[in-house]
Image: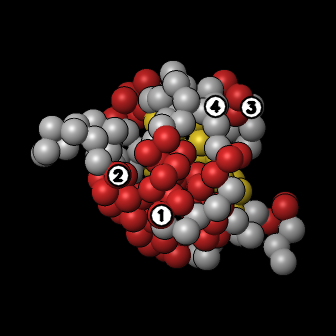
Amino acid sequence: MVDDYSKKRVLFLCTENSCRSQMAEAITRHYWGERIDAYSAGVRPKGVNPMAKKALHEMGIDGLDALYSKALDEFLGEKIDLVITLCDGAKEECPFFPGATERLHMPFRDPSKEGPQGKVELEDFIEVAREIKGALEVLFREKGWI
């Protein structure tokens, strides 16, 4: 078991903290939580998208009742090893994060926007969640965190 002082701390940022950053937080906690503390926040949080929770549930991820939208201000002054922006809006609106050791931009498409069929589909959320999981697994392995 890894003690809390040796855990890496990752903050995922999106504009609204409703979808991609929530999924990244839940995925990280589920798969690598014993080695990485994951958090998410938004520049203008608006609540967790129910389809994001559904997609995570479909992937077998639990603890979804604990997800809630958080404002970026909640993490100011915190020591964070890595801040990852998941949308261009967050990257532009938050170009610097005090207390962060490293910053990285990993943009993913927004599954809450209408897709090719002209509507929002659960399959789009699942696809983006799987893309996020794959990218994070590669990143965390490259860093030697998992």
Question: Amino acid under label 2?
Answer: Leu
Task: Point out the tag, 2 or 1, that comes first from the N-terminus.
Answer: 1
For mark 1, what is the residue?
58
What label sits on residue 122 in the rendered view? 2
Tag 2 and tag 4, C-beta contact below 8 Å: no
Q: Give residue 75's position: percent from left, percent from top.
A: 70, 33
Q: Is residue 5 left or right of residue 47?
A: right
Considering the numbered disc 3 on the image, is that residue within a helix, a strand or a loop? loop
Considering the numbered disc 4 on the image, is that residue within a helix, a strand or a loop? loop
- Mark pair 4, 1: CA separation: 24 Å
For mark 4, what is the residue?
70
Question: For this rendering, which residue is in front, 49 or 98?
Answer: 49
Picture mark count:
4
Question: Amino acid under label 3?
Answer: Gly
Residue at image position (41%, 69%) is: 134
Mark 2, mark 4: which one is toward the viewer? 2
